[in-house]
Amino acid sequence: MEYIVIRLSKFAGFILIMFFCLNVSGQSSSLEELRKRKEKTASEIEYINNLLKETNTNAKASLNRLSVLERQIKLQDALINNITGEIGYLDESIRLNLKQIDSLSQALQRVKLKYAAMIRYADRNQDNSNQLLFLLSAQDFNQAYKRFIYLREYADYRRTQAEKINTYKNSITSQLLEFNKRKDEKQHLLVSKVNQTKIIEIQKKQQKDVYSELQQKEKDLKRKLENQRKAEIRLEQEIERVIADEAKKLNRKSAKDKGLSLTSEEKLLSGDFSNNRGKFPWPVQRGLITDHFGEHPHAILKYVVVRNAGVDITTAANAKARSIFKGEVTKVVAIPGGNLAVIIRHGNYLTVYSNLSEVFVKAGQQVEGKEEIGNIFTDQSDDNKTVLKFQLWRENTKLDPEEWLKQM
């Protein structure tokens, strides 16, 4: 029975230390994920700050600036939430550290007591003849062998107790270091949270000031909205012409190819395109969406509904537009009030890149994914904004580009 107790005691000590290691590992993994999200959010905030710096110090209020500020505040909010979550994990980690230190201290005390008892026992039974007598008094060879194994295990157990004491001491030292580290991290995060909260208060005031200023420019906003809508209608008409022209070509092919609407190559391209939904690279190297697809209320004008056939992506000055997938440039068109636009066909899908100041491609040209197709126009008369208008069509059906682009 004593032999079994010795082996169970070894196993229990091993399990205790392994449990603490796994617990710390699980906590570190969750904390690491939170920190990665925080770093990503902080990077986006830095990018937006740089976009806002590109405008003049005395930049006038604009809808684009309002959208950028709104995005900045949402990200700042997300950053504060990340910091709060990280503090929560550190609190739990600190609690576990204290619990583990307490458990290890208790385990260490138990091992010390057992070790002291063994030393006292050894002092009283130092004569090796006692062990020999124990072996010789066995009833048969089998019992003698079991007693021999027991004595050997007992000697091993005694030797390993000293090692176990050192192991527990080292574990307690490690946990104390981790505890102090977590406390310092928590204090740093609490200071950071206070600072970020002050920043968001300043940003909300800026947003409120821009909003108030825009409310006083209702006529100007209505005029700009009307001009923008006219440019969008002209672009849609051009897209519809492209679709109609392509349909005529396909109908001619259908007569020759016994009803096939697309060639095998075009079908393959369409299949490749649809299979990449949610995975496409953005049509700019970096940017943020400041106006979304579909119908939604105007940010300032009451009872006015904005209809966007695609998305508006605000990016840095001198940014380049790039194709999101391989395809053929179907048309390059100048849109009054909307600068230049490029339409690219990918099988039975179309992507449209408008508000370009310069174009690098021409109709009939084959392009690859991420290939630069033109410079995006920077409007120096309107807050120095640089906005790419991007649309996605499946023949004559408008699609929401956000559902097709991968998350930045």
Image (cartoon, rainbow, N blue to C red):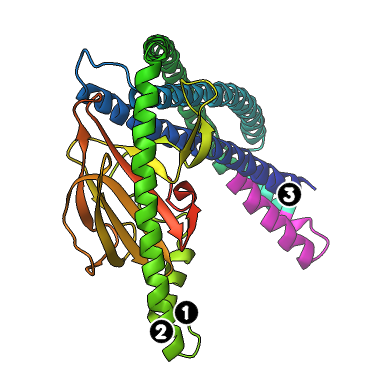
**What residue is pinned by disc 1?**
261
Q: Nearer the viewer, mark 3 or mark 1?
A: 1
**What residue is pinned by disc 3?**
3
Label whose residue precedes the other's in the sequence (2 or 3)? 3
Vertical arrangement, residue 216 with respect to residue 27, above or below: above
Task: State the SS at label 1.
Answer: loop
Q: CA distance from mark 3 to mark 1?
A: 83 Å
Question: Residue 86 location in percent, x, y?
Answer: 50, 25
Question: Alpha-carbon neighbours of circle 2 within 10 Å: few (<14), some, or many (≥20)?
Answer: some
Circles 2 and 3 in contact, beta carbons < 8 Å: no
Say whether residue 130 is visible. Answer: no
Residue visible at 40% across and 84% down in the picture: 253
Question: Residue 211 location in percent, x, y?
Answer: 41, 14
**What residue is pinned by disc 2?**
253
In the shown orientation, is residue 68 left or right of residue 15? Answer: left
Question: Residue 258 location in percent, x, y?
Answer: 49, 90
Amino acid type, residue under disc 3 in the picture: Tyr
Residue visible at 43% across and 50% down in the picture: 406
Amino acid type, residue under disc 2 in the picture: Lys
The outermost residue toward the right is: 139
